[in-house]
Each structure stands twice: as C-alpha cells, then as structure tokens.
Amino acid sequence: MEENNVEQNLVGTVSYFLYAVRRYLVLILAIIIVCVSAGVTFSLVRKPNYKATAKVVVSATLNGAGWSDETNWIQNHIKTIIDFCNSGVVVDRANYYYLQWEKVKYEGAEADLEDFIENPPAYQTNPEHNGMAYKIAPSNIDTAFVEHENSTSIVFDVSYTDKNQEDAKEKVSILLCACIEEVKIEDSKGEKVYFTADVNLKNNGIDSVEKDISTLSIVFVSGVMGVLLAVLVLYVLILLDNSIRSKEELEAIVGASMLATIQKNGGGEKNGK
C-alpha cells in the first residue's frame, strides 16, 4: 500500500510539474531568452584577454661540457633564466623598448617589429626613472618550463596577456628581446654580469595566441544559467500555488470522503442554451 502511495505521489508530482511547465512556458522562454541576450551583449561589449606565447631556446656551456653532464646545475640555471624574464631589469628595459617601438610605429607606417628587435635602440634609462608609464606589466608575464631540446639546449615558454591581440604579440616579443639584451651584458673585464656561463637565448617567435573565453562559451553559459533560473522560478511558483488539483488533496484538507466531482465544462452551448 505504501509503495502504491509513493508511486501515486511521484506520478502526481511529475504530472503537475509538466503542467506547470506548460502553464508558464512563455515565462520560462522569456527568462532563457533574456539570459542568452545578456550573454550575447556581454560578449560583444567586453574586451577579451589574449595570451600570446613565444618559445625560447636557451643554450649554455659550462667549462665546455654539455648540459646533460651537469643535470643539477642545469635545473637551477634554467629556473634562474625563467625568473630573469620576470625580473625588474628585464621589465624596465622591455618597457623602454616598447615605448620606443610605439614611436617608430607612429612615425612610419612601414615599421617592422622584426627589424626593430634585431637592432634594438640603445638602452638609456628605465621608464620608471624617466617618469614614463609602464606599458608591459610584470603581472601579465607568465613563464613555464617546456622540455629539453637536446643535450645543450632547453626550451621554455614566455607568455604575455593583453586586451589587444597584436599588443600581446608585440609585448611578448619585445620582452624577450630585452631579456636577450640583458643576458649579453658584460662588465669592464668582459665577464657576464648576470650569468657565469656562456648563455644564449633565441626567440623562435610567437607559438600561439589564445583568447581567454570565446563568444560561444559565454552564450552557452548564459543559456545554462537561464535554464537554471527558469527552473528556480518555476519551483517557487509551484510552492506558492495553493490551489487544489485533485480529489485526494481536497479529502486530505477537509478530512472527509467525497461522493462525486463535477468536471469543468469547457464547451457549453451557444446563446446560453
């Protein structure tokens, strides 16, 4: 008997839910359409973030030996070089280069970034000391170890995130140019300033440019949120609905059995007959 009651309650619940869906179908569709429209509008208005990634090949020698002969030294050395890309000296130089590159672009429509990087301007001072605003932010720089290429070189990624796709590509290239130039610095005795070994950095160019989130993803998420919001609203409407939907509910309320029910006549005769 109890199982039958449970089944009847379940069937009744599902039936009423479907009835409520049909009854409030226009409202449900309106909620979903509004949410999807909001997602489309947001995707058109917002400026997405673009992450440009370049691969860097680092090669070095230590007393003529290959990196494979000095595994521990290699691991520490590559970490130092990766951290070096995020260091203040490199970021300062990169910002100086980027400001100079902006001037080159403004002065000539035929400006070529590769030519600029191959022959960077003489580094005189950093933007911070010169009262210039930073354009390459350290927080937007991301470095990650990739792999050993062979016994004498290692590859790692350097990425930069920006609101503009071309700016992201330019900034990561100029950042690597600054890193390469800093690695070359020698003191008055001709010795390396930052690294004791003979370190060479080579930029293989932009490997990929990724958009943080696509318009399709935003529309999909907004659609899912619309469906969930519609279900929530429908659930609240069901809870607030205090109408009597069956003979059993009425008997439970009044505490007495019913002899008969009168069905609502949806037709009726014309002219009141």
Image (cartoon, rainbow, N blue to C red):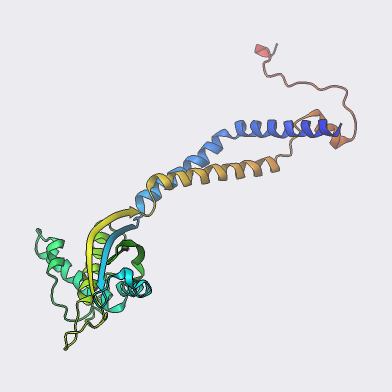
Closer to the camera, 242 or 40? 40
**Is residue 63 depicted above or below 234 in this figure?**
below
Question: Residue 142: percent from the left, percent from the top?
Answer: 35, 66
Question: Residue 173: percent from the left, percent from the top?
Answer: 23, 64
Q: Is residue 55 left or right of residue 113?
A: right
**Residue 13: quarter of image:** top right
Question: Residue 264: percent from the left, percent from the top?
Answer: 73, 21
**Is residue 224 depicted above or below 74 in this figure?**
above
Please state, as top left, top right, bottom left or bottom right, where the N terminus lies in the image. Answer: top right
**Residue 266: quarter of image:** top right
Question: Residue 198: percent from the left, percent from the top?
Answer: 22, 76
Please state, as top left, top right, bottom left or bottom right, where the C terminus lies in the image. Answer: top right
Residue 210 in view: yes
Closer to the camera, 108 or 143? 143
Q: Is residue 155 left or right of residue 202?
A: right
Closer to the camera, 70 or 23? 70
Closer to the camera, 28 or 204? 204
